[in-house]
Amino acid sequence: MRTERFTLDTNILFYSVDTEAGPRHALAATIIERAVACDCWLTLQAVSEFYFAVTRKRVMPADAAAAQAGDWLDMFTAVPSSPEAVRAALVLAASRRVSYWDALLIATAGEAGCTAILTEDLSDGATVHGVRIVHPFDGSELTSAARALLFPAA
């Protein structure tokens, strides 16, 4: 089986618990369910942003959000941002017009050996800092690129 290490952006984590997100809710839940069986690593930044976003937008109470974040930290390999990733993010943000936080997520993922990130926040198909951007949603279905990551060929 061909496997590719990838990571998930905060929006995937958010949609997985947001029952008002329409088809994205079910798709995000499927993504996480499948990602556990794949070589998916989470950045501590994405888990932290998840907690902040769902509590700020009142999608979940703080204790439930903390429990969910803790579960993901148990389920996935989690990686922190290093000083080198911060430096790379500063360069990316200054030169590529990527937001600093997106740049830090990308730099941390790349440093961890991830070759792709599932997100809808960046340019689909672009490669930034060695990490390919994959939009996961195509209406009520997963995109073919997302399916390739989540259901690797045997």
Image (cartoon, rainbow, N blue to C red):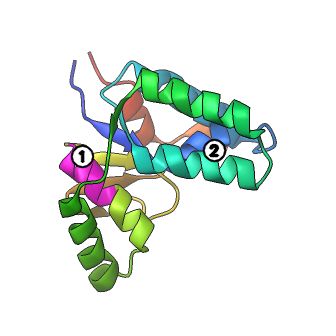
From the top left corner, tell me how far across and down residue 50 is, in percent. 58, 47
**Mark 2: which amino acid?**
Phe
- Please give the residue where the numbered disc 2 appears in the rendered image: 14
Q: For residue 40, which quarter of the picture?
A: top left
Q: Tell me the residue that label 1 is attached to.
A: 115
Q: Does residue 36 sit above or below 92 in this rendering?
A: above
Q: Residues within 10 Å of mark 1 (few under 14, many from 20)?
A: many
Quadrant for the C terminus in the image: top left
Q: Quadrant of the N terminus?
A: top left
Residue 107 is left or right of residue 60, and the answer is left
Question: Is residue 80 one of those drawn in magenta?
Answer: no
Q: Quadrant of residue 82?
A: bottom left
Q: Position of residue 151 (x, y in %)?
A: 39, 24
Of mark 1 and mark 2, the one earlier in the sequence is 2
Q: Position of residue 123 (x, y in %)?
A: 42, 66
Residue 58: give x, y in percent of width and height: 80, 48
Residue at (30% x, 27% y) in the render: 39
Label 2: few (<14), some or many (≥20) within 10 Å?
A: many
Front: mark 1 or 2 = 2
- 105 or 119, which lies in front? 105
Judging depth in this view, the residue of 42 and 24 nearest the camera is 42
Give the amino acid at mark 1. Answer: Thr
Looking at the image, residue 129 lies above or below residue 45: below
Horizontal side of 125 relative to 25 (left or right) equals left
- Does residue 51 sit above or below 19 in this rendering? below
Q: Residue at x 78, y 38 (%)?
A: 61
Our reading of the magenta stretch's main secondary structure is helix
Stretch of the chain drawn in magenta: 106-112
Query: Who's the residue at 72% across and 48% down the image?
Result: 55
